[in-house]
Image (spheres, rainbow, N blue to C red):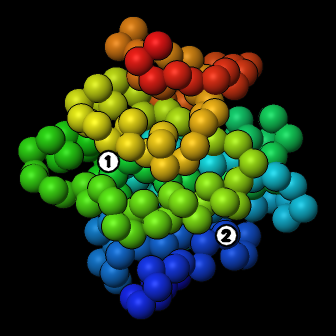
């Protein structure tokens, strides 16, 4: 999917499966989606940063989010992140200045996905505590309420990969 350089708009959510990347090298991923029931509501999941999933291939986190969403009766998922750099190793966020590209196209994608979704699930795990003000900025951008599966001891929303399949959505209040 392309980004309109004049307006910043992206063709998010079109088709059964897709993703929006920064360029052909796919260094930054702004959005990903999967649809199994086009008439159903969509769940927006916001994690820390993208791993290996792309427009056609799922990674373990995407498979887990899809499983939860199907179990809760959603017709599809939209996936965004606090940071847009594609890496299976989140330590890159703390070792390379400005690598995550917060704001800009990433925030544009989050706003567009929020408009297409009926509920927001956040789950960046304890790494959110190292992300400065970014989690609060994204929650403000998305609007409350946002939901999580469980809160870590550090007060961050648990990553869904490590949660039981019977987990239920609960309202997440940052810092509560």
In the image, 27 versus 83, the foreground residue is 83
Residue bearing mark 2: 13
Q: Which is nearer the eye, 60 or 30? A: 30
At a point 52% along the width and 79% down the height, the residue shown is 9
* Residue 172 visible within the image: yes
Q: Is residue 34 above or below residue 41?
A: below
Image location (x, y in percent) of residue 168: 72, 21
- Who's the residue at 87% across and 55% down the image? 40
Can you give x and y, in whole percent of width and height, for residue 114 in the image?
62, 55
69 versus 151 height, above or below: below
Instruction: Assign a secondary structure to mark 1.
Output: loop
Judge left or right: residue 73 versus residue 54.
right
Q: Is residue 157 above or below residue 122?
A: above
Q: Nearer the viewer, mark 1 or mark 2?
A: 2
Position in image of residue 33 (x %, y %): 62, 62
Location of residue 102 by image quarter:
bottom left
User: Splitting the image into 4 quarters, where does residue 155 fall?
Assistant: top left
Check disc 1 and report the residue beneath it. 88
Q: Name the image quarter holding residue 106.
A: bottom left
Q: Residue at x 10, y 53 (%)?
A: 97
Q: Residue at x 18, y 47 (%)?
A: 92
- Residue 47 x/y as whole percent: 45, 42
């Amino acid at each position: 999917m392309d980004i309109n350089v004049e307006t910043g708009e992206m063709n998010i959510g079109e088709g059964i499966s897709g993703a929006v990347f920064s360029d052909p090298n796919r260094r930054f991923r702004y959005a990903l989606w999967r649809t199994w029931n086009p008439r159903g509501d969509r769940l927006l999941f916001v994690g820390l940063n993208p791993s290996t999933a792309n427009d056609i291939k799922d990674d373990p986190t995407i498979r887990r989010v899809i499983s939860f969403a199907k179990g809760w009766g959603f017709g599809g998922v939209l996936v965004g992140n606090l940071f847009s750099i594609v890496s299976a190793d989140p330590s890159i966020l703390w070792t390379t200045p400005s690598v995550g590209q917060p704001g800009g196209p990433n925030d544009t994608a989050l706003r567009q996905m929020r408009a297409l979704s009926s509920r927001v699930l956040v789950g960046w795990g304890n790494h959110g505590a190292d992300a400065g003000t970014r989690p609060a900025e994204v929650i403000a951008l998305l609007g409350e309420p946002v939901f999580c599966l469980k809160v870590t001891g550090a007060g961050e929303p648990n990553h869904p990969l490590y949660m039981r399949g019977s987990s239920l959505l609960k309202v997440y209040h940052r810092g509560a």
